[in-house]
Image (tube, rainbow, N blue to C red):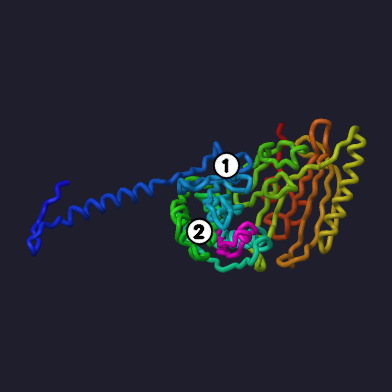
Amino acid sequence: MRITPHTSANGSDAIALFPLLTVMMFLLCVHGAAHAQAMETFTNDRESAPMVMADFYADFSVSYPASWIIASHPEENGAFFKVYHAMKYNGNPSFVSDQFTIGPLLVSAQENDSLTLALVMQQAALFEKTQFGMRVSGFKHVHEGTLKVDGLQAFEIRTEGAADIERRAGAAGYGRFIFVLPTATNDGLTIGLTATSASTDVHGSDDVGVKGEMAAILKSVKIPRHRKADLHSMRTFVNTREKTITELQSDFFGFSLDFPRTWNLRTSAIESHAFVTLRRGVVRAGISDFSTDAISVSPLDYRAGSDSARRAILITLTDTLEHQVAASMASFERVSRGQVRLDGRDGLEFRYRGTMPGKGAAGVTYYGRLILISPTSREPGTVIDLHSTSLSAGVAGPQDVGEKGDLGAVLRSFKFRK
């Protein structure tokens, strides 16, 4: 670039400022562009996602600063993606000042947005209580409200309080947790942002995801809309070893079953006592996730050499479980007990009715059915626990549990798999 001299008022030569400023602005733009490009992009991919997360898979992409550290096994914390910024702080050479995670939202899209939001708010309250309320020093719930993420409705909570590692380092902790609602065209997501007083430009929970580098990360989240699911259609759960936690591996068996898309799903990674739990929740008496129908499939943990020995143990276990169910209810009446056959295998079952204590249960009658399938010399046994209520469509009593309504369709679809 040619710089042209000009004569000043006192006769001295001066450098024209306009070309020089142009050069400076150009260099600043180049520096800014280089800084903006120092980002990495993560795209969630069904083929490479860990099997333990397969039933909760959701499409999204997110960008993060290249200087941040991406966790190699986020699924161990129930997440698809985890990235954090580490720094030297108060003697800790690798203090995590900021962390950003994206995981599944364990709520399915319902037939209307208000019900979906009510279920999400219930999930958020449970998440806050179990993850932070009893584990974070000085915990405070400071805000909740709605917002948009990539144009989708979401609910958020903001918190303050220091975890042990932050407290030892003398840092304050700030949290922001965003729950993106599922719809017929996208799955829900849980987005966790945690920052500390060591974070750049963050001075409180109001700054988390608003200032500093995490603001750019949150803004970069993209959620495709392409699934276009029929909310009245069915999904299929297939039990595999890869999805099963270590504690249940010795009693693993393969099976599959179909369930309504609006029902909520929990695998053993979420609820460790069962391979899978499926339930329908509704809003009732101030409870946004009152269970009207449910089924869980668990291992029946015993071995016996002969057929007669297996039958004797099965009878004893059925007695024990019946007493446990009766003790958990405000009133209990067994209405039938006898042999059952499920997908070619034999077992015992009992059916019952009763009422339950607790908020929301007043005026609701529970109809239950517990099926115990005996183990064989090659296959472990199983317990299938089903319940419907007087709120369930098409169900008039215990005789209809697993026979009519949505739960009937679920049980009829059950298949053992090799």
At horizontal 71% and vertical 36% (from top left) the residue drawn is: 254
User: Residue visible at 52% across and 51% down?
Assistant: 85
The x, y position of residue 279, in whole percent, is: 68, 52
- Where's the C terminus, which quadrant? top right
Residue 45 vs residue 343: left or right?
left
* Crowd class of label 2 (few under 14; some 14 to 19; many from 20; radius 10 Å): many
Side of 21 relative to 312 (left or right): left
Question: Relative to 59, is 313 on the left or the right?
Answer: right
Does 144 lie within the magenta span? no
Residue drawn at point x = 65 percent, y = 43 percent:
258
The range drawn in magenta is 157-180
Q: For residue 112, say whether it is visible.
A: no
Indicate the secondary structure of the residue bearing disc 1.
loop
Q: Is residue 297 left or right of residue 205?
A: right
* The one of 159 and 94 positioned closer to us in this rendering: 94
Residue 72, labelled with which disc?
1
Residue occupied by mark 2: 199
Q: Is residue 66 visible?
A: yes
Q: Secondary structure under badge 2?
A: loop
- The tag on residue 123 is none
Q: CA distance from mark 2 to mark 1?
A: 23 Å
